[in-house]
Image (cartoon, rainbow, N blue to C red):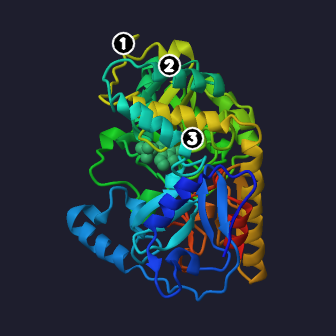
């Protein structure tokens, strides 16, 4: 049996051997168990390229998740719900979650040795593929100098410059450790700058788990069936106003009822936390106009969309420039990170340049900065976003076609490396539309796809993500 190296691969022989060692061997057929799953199994991606095995006829390995179940059963006694972030627990699709052992390129392996084409990509950061060789090599070098300084480091300047050059609204940036923190910092500075308290957010949009945002907050919360979380005091949310996404009239009404009191309108410019929902162009344009007219700030939460739907984020893609932007996920290349930034006059209010306090022990640490810099460098290569657009379009069109041909009501869409589909005839313009989906059907579909080696987000109300490491072969196998 010959291994075919796809032209252009940068997957080194040594790394290939390294992976093969990790995979349990099926002694009966003398092959790594991984290869017995399908005759043209994709073996391993490295930095966007794939080593593919030639066709062989072997018996399909039975899909078992016994080790995952044992580990997760133990985890439930140790951590609330067995997880450290709720959606991972598979509550909305049922069954037990899969416990991962390793990831590389577009693929993931679980503790039972099952291989998956991964469309979660650690919820967005893995846009150049998991465990990219160049990022790993840079991290190893950075690690030798220490994991955290608690003092300025040069890598902060480098990443800050890259972010400022890329994102139209950002003239100054502050790095933090998560998207949640970024949104908290953004909110404080928006309120300080405008000397106003109220904010408008949209139903089904998620901006991290800080108290003021936990109102109609999308997938994670919707999945638990909690409209608001216990423990969030009324005082924290009474200045949070909500409107349906894509409904400019509802926003104008709120502005009319609260003239001069609204500090900011914050939104996911492309929603990912109610499933994938595109904005109407006139909605974004309308928000820009109404905020400007009232002296409120427009904030794009680009924790998910930043560097994903364009190098300059949704604001570059749609040509609408907000006043403030939050980032996370991709700019940390898989390490914990977040950032908020905007016009210089606003950001100069943040301590110590100004009076708005916000701080962080590990903020700007050299590892996260290094992974972020290398990830953005890879994304700068010509053709990155065209490639994401091509494979993601092929995936979504393919899924819709085979689903509809089999008699299922489905709708969906994508922008570059972000996608989603609903078991719902559509169209879906907001969270209320998304909630008309057949979630029981999605749960069965999700489990079926797992058994076929495809790892989708475990909720109908989450977007999916592709990466530069996803091959056309990955996409076609998924559709098949
Ligand atoms: C749009 C958006 N904002 C904020 C957050 C919170 O980011 P984190 O999970 O890093 O705290 C998320 C997380 O998925 C997000 O999608």
- Residue at label 3? 267
Q: Secondary structure at mark 2?
A: helix
In this rendering, is residue 47 above or below 319?
below
Looking at the picture, tell me which residue is in the foreground, 40 or 81.
40
Pointer 2 local density, CA inside 10 Å: few below 14, some 14–19, many at least 20: few
The CA span between labels 2 and 1 is: 17 Å
Measure the alpha-carbon separation of dots 3 and 2: 28 Å
Q: Quadrant of residue 238?
A: top left
Q: Position of residue 447 (x, y in %)?
A: 52, 78
Q: Quadrant of residue 374?
A: top right
- Helix, strand or loop for disc 1: loop
- Specify whether residue 459 is in view: yes
Please give the residue where the numbered disc 1 appears in the rendered image. 352
Tell me the distance, in whole angstroms, between the alpha carbons under discs 1 and 3. 28 Å
Label 2 CB-ligand 1 distance < 8 A: no
Give the number of the disc on residue 157. Answer: 2
At label 1, counting other C-alpha atoms closer than 10 Å, the crowd grade (few under 14, some 14-19, many 20 or more) is: few
Task: Where is residue 225? Give x, y as percent.
Answer: 41, 65
Residue 156 % position (x, y): 46, 22
Q: Quadrant of the N terminus?
A: bottom right
Is residue 303 in sight in this rendering?
Answer: no
Q: In the structure shown, which secondary structural element does the residue marked by tag 3 occupy?
A: strand
Q: Earlier in the sequence, mark 2 or mark 1?
A: 2
Direction left: furthest residue: 77
Of 137 and 260, which appears nearest the observer?
A: 137
Residue at the spot x=38%, y=66% of the render? 89
Q: Is residue 473 above or below residue 216?
A: below
Q: Earlier in the sequence, mark 1 or mark 3?
A: 3
Residue in the image at 43% along x and 33% along y: 141
């Amino acid at each position: 049996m010959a291994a075919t190296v796809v032209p252009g691969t940068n997957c080194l022989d040594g790394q290939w051997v390294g992976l093969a060692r990790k995979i349990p061997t099926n002694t009966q057929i003398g092959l790594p168990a991984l290869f017995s799953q399908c005759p043209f199994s994709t073996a391993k991606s490295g930095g966007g390229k794939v080593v593919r095995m030639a066709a062989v006829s072997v018996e399909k390995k039975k899909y078992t998740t016994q080790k995952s179940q044992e580990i997760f059963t133990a985890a439930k006694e140790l951590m609330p719900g067995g997880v450290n972030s709720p959606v991972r627990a598979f509550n909305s699709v049922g069954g037990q979650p899969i416990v991962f052992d390793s990831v590389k390129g577009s693929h993931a392996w679980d503790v039972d040795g099952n291989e998956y084409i991964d469309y979660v990509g650690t919820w967005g950061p893995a846009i150049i593929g998991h465990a990219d060789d160049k990022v790993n090599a840079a991290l190893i070098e950075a690690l030798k100098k220490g994991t955290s300084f608690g003092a300025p480091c040069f890598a902060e300047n480098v990443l800050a410059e890259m972010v400022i050059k890329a994102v139209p609204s950002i003239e100054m940036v502050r790095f933090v450790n998560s998207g949640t923190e970024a949104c908290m910092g953004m909110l404080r500075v928006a309120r300080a700058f405008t000397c106003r308290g109220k904010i408008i957010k949209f139903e089904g949009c998620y901006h991290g788990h800080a108290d003021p945002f936990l109102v109609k907050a999308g997938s994670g919360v919707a999945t638990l069936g909690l409209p608001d979380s216990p423990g969030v005091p009324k005082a924290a949310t009474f200045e949070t106003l909500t409107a349906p996404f894509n409904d400019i009239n509802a926003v104008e009404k709120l502005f009319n009822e609260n003239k001069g009191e609204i500090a900011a309108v914050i939104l996911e410019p492309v929603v990912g936390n109610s499933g994938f929902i595109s904005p109407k162009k006139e909605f974004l344009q309308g928000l820009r106009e109404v905020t400007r007219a009232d002296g409120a700030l427009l904030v794009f939460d680009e924790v998910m969309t930043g560097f994903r739907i364009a190098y300059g984020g949704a604001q570059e893609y749609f040509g609408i420039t907000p006043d403030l932007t939050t980032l996370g996920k991709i700019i940390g290349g898989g390490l914990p990170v977040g950032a908020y930034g905007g016009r210089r006059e606003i950001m100069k209010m943040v301590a110590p340049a100004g009076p708005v306090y916000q701080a962080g022990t590990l903020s700007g640490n050299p590892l996260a900065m290094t992974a972020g810099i290398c990830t953005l460098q890879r994304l700068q290569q010509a053709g990155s976003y065209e490639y994401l657009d091509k494979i993601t379009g092929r995936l979504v069109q393919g899924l819709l076609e085979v689903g509809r041909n089999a008699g299922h009501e489905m709708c969906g869409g994508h922008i570059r490396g972000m996608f989603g589909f609903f078991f719902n005839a559509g169209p879906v313009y907001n969270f209320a539309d998304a909630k008309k989906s057949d979630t029981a059907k999605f749960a069965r579909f999700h489990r079926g796809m797992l058994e076929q080696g495809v790892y989708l987000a475990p909720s109908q109300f989450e977007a999916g993500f592709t990466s530069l490491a996803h091959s056309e072969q990955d996409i076609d196998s998924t559709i098949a």
